[in-house]
Each structure stands twice: as structure tokens, then as C-alpha cells.
Amino acid sequence: MEGDIILYDWLSFTLKRDNPHVIVDLLGLKEIPWEQIKGARGYQERLYFNGISIHYNGRPDMGIWCEMSGQGCRAFETLTTWEDKWEQLFFFLYAHGANITRLDVAYDDHTGTLDINQIIQDTRFKEYVSKSDYWEILESSKGQTLQFGSPQSDVLIRIYDKAAERNCASGEHWVRCELQLRRERAIAFAQLEMPVGEAYCGVVINYLRFVEPMDGDSNKWRWPIKPYWGEFLCNARAIHIYAEPGLEYNLDRCQKYVINQAGNAIDALIQITGVDGFMDLLKKRTTKRNPKYDQMVQEFKTFTLGGSANEKT
């Protein structure tokens, strides 16, 4: 994937209703095959599809709780019938009195602006200013993660090596700067009438800045911003219209899932049955088709091959 992008990567909200299909309608996802499974956190039942959970049938005062993971956000973008997608969803949530409990906005740096090692070093050297006095650095086999704000904070910034987490190819740069908002802060962000890039920058620069030391000035809030942090904020601000990941992002994830997770099994089957035999097995599979993959194929035919989106897949 080339170029930087801003994503909505988590959404959680509650609604004082009893019928879960109210949320299905709000999401514009009436036609997908929802699965009914057990609920959580006091809810007895749940409608689930591809990272989207709609919990219901709890106590009378609990209403309905919807939670969308990063995968769920991508499914929403791909399959919703709403033309303006996030803008319309936030408008509908506000109009129906929904309470947004968590909203994550992530900036994915693929061009090399953010160096996770440099950022961690600047943090250890105290060359930053933040509204939070809590920070932590985590190191594991999945790379390094830097976090400003406690897990209970209404505003939390998390910076980590996404390429290492995803086991990307050597040399691939992917650093994510994730803004996690809760409660009133999440609601306020969703109601901002400005491009998502500008809103994201406004919150981040108010909450966290990496700065260059100035001799003779002990007030770090007056220190100039470090060039890389200024470039990062300018790049994010330049994404004036929400940059939907679309086909390229979803195709990349699909390919990595098939090759990395099932590649060895597929290779063995092809060696045993041959390519034609393997394709015949695929056609005879009994699992229900997932509409997100049909949509991806249609987009590929339309925008890459110049075919018709209405062709049968």
C-alpha cells in the first residue's frame, strides 16, 4: 500500500432501544447475513457479522450496545448502503440520541515520516510535552508500542510498529499513530464539522508534541516542534476528505490472510488434487458466501479491469 491514510478503527455506542434491527438500519446493513450468538457484559443476545457486534436483551435500562472493531469498520465501509458512510452514520447516531462510548481514529504512515525508534528515544529523553503525565513503552516479538495516557483516559495516543505486528515483508514501513477517544471526547469528535484530518491534528497537537530543546528556556511548552512531528501533522491535516481504504486495503488484507494463514494447506491440496481439482472443491464448498468478498470482486472488475459491477461473480 502506498501513501498515508486516516481510518476510523473502532466505534462503540449505546442506544436506548430494545430492537437490535434499529442499529442494523442505522448502519445501512440490512442485507448482510447476521449471525445470532450469545451476548456479553450483561446482554443475553447478539447479532454478529465480521467484527460488528450488536448486543441486546439486557436489563431494561441497558438499551442496545454496538461495537465495531477495525475489521467491523472496514466491513461497514464496504457494505453500507449509505453514500456518505461515516458522515451519515454520525448524523444518525446524534439524531437518535446514541451515546458514543469509544471512537478510535488511526493515522497509518506508509511513507516513512514517523520513525518508531526515534519517537521512543525522544520520549525517554523527555523531549515532548503532553497533557498526560502517564506514558509507557512496550516491547515484544510484535514490535514496539508507545502509549500516552492511561487505559482509563478519555484521550489516549498509541504509536506502534504496525509492520512488525503484521509480520510484513522486510523493509515495509507501516507506523500507526492511533487516537483513542472515550465518552464526551468521542462524542465531541464525531460532532466536529471539519475534515477528519484537521480534527485529528487538532486533538493530537493539543494533547502531544515532540519538541526540540532550547537553551535557557525551561518551559518545554515554548520549545519548537520537532520537524518529523510537524511533517506528520501537516500530512494528516492534508487528508481533508475521509480517505476510505477501499479495495486496495481490503484486497491486501484478504491476500495476506489467505497466503499467511492458509497458504500451506492450499499448497498441499493443490499438489494432491491439482489446480483444477482444487478449483472444483472450492465451487462445491458448503459455507455461505460472505458478501464483503463479492463486493471486493465487483470493485476489482469495475475499477481495475473495466468490467461491470453487475457481472455475476
Image (spheres, rainbow, N blue to C red):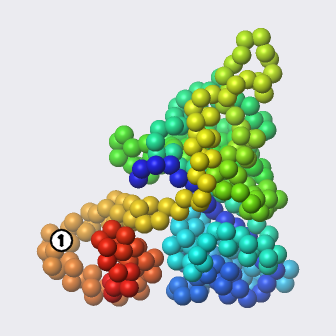
Choose between 196 and 79: the one closer to the eye: 196
Q: Position of residue 278 (x, y in %)?
A: 20, 77
Q: Is residue 312 left or right of residue 24?
A: left
Query: Where is 92 relative to 240, above or below?
Result: below
Q: Is residue 51 visible?
A: no
Write down the residue under mark 1. 270
Q: Position of residue 173 (x, y in %)?
A: 43, 42
Q: Position of residue 261 (x, y in %)?
A: 36, 62
Choose between 50 and 193: the one closer to the eye: 193
Q: Is residue 210 visible?
A: yes
Q: Is residue 228 left or right of residue 292?
A: right
Residue 41, image quadrant: bottom right
Residue at the (59%, 87%) spot, across then down: 30
Residue at the (69%, 60%) spot, across then down: 103
Choose between 198 and 58: the one closer to the eye: 198
Query: Where is 255 relative to 58, above or below?
Result: above
Q: Amino acid at mark 1?
A: Ile
Q: Position of residue 50 (x, y in %)?
A: 52, 74
Residue projecting furthest to the top: 216
Question: SS at mark 1?
Answer: helix
